[in-house]
Image (cartoon, rainbow, N blue to C red):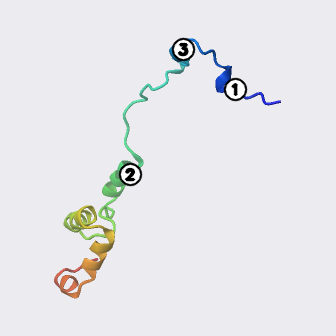
Amino acid sequence: MNQCAQVEDLPHDNWRDQSWQEEFPSHLKAGTSHGVTSTQFENYLDKEILEGGDIWGPFESEEEWQLAKWFIKNVGHTQAKDFLRLNVVSDMVCLS
């Protein structure tokens, strides 16, 4: 015997007007903020800066990072890699 609810089990009169919501207990504070804090990445970056680490990762400078970011955003990862592999580009720029 199937004990699952069926559409036919619902009363046909005013079934669309029925509310299927339940109030969430207010003492559990659903959706409330727990404050403002830094992300894990921001904490990592702060630590790298304080310890004199290499904050630009594999890039030599912020300018190199901005160039790579621009390529990824506007050209795409594969095309950017292909561009940077061109002899004319790699000869002009000392890529890290």
- Residue 29, given in percent of the width and then of the height, sits at 49, 21
Give the vertical position of 52 relative to 86 (above or below): above
- Residue 26, given in percent of the width and then of the height, sits at 51, 16
Amino acid carrying mark 1 in the image:
Ala
Which label's residue is closer to the chain start, 1 or 2? 1
For the image shown, how many numbered marks are present on the structure?
Answer: 3
Which label's residue is closer to the chain start, 3 or 2? 3
Crowd around label 3: few <14 · some 14–19 · many ≥20 (10 Å): few
Label 3 residue SS: loop
Amino acid carrying mark 2 in the image:
Phe
Q: CA distance from mark 3 to mark 2?
A: 47 Å
Can you tell which mark lies on residue 41?
Answer: 2
- Residue 39, given in percent of the width and then of the height, sits at 39, 45
Between disc 3 and disc 2, the foreground one is 3
Amino acid carrying mark 3 in the image:
Gln
Which residue has dot 3 on it?
A: 18
Can you tell which mark lies on residue 61?
Answer: none
Label 1 residue SS: loop
Can you tell which mark lies on residue 5?
Answer: 1
Label 2 residue SS: helix
Which label's residue is closer to the chain start, 3 or 1? 1
Q: CA distance from mark 1 to mark 2?
A: 48 Å
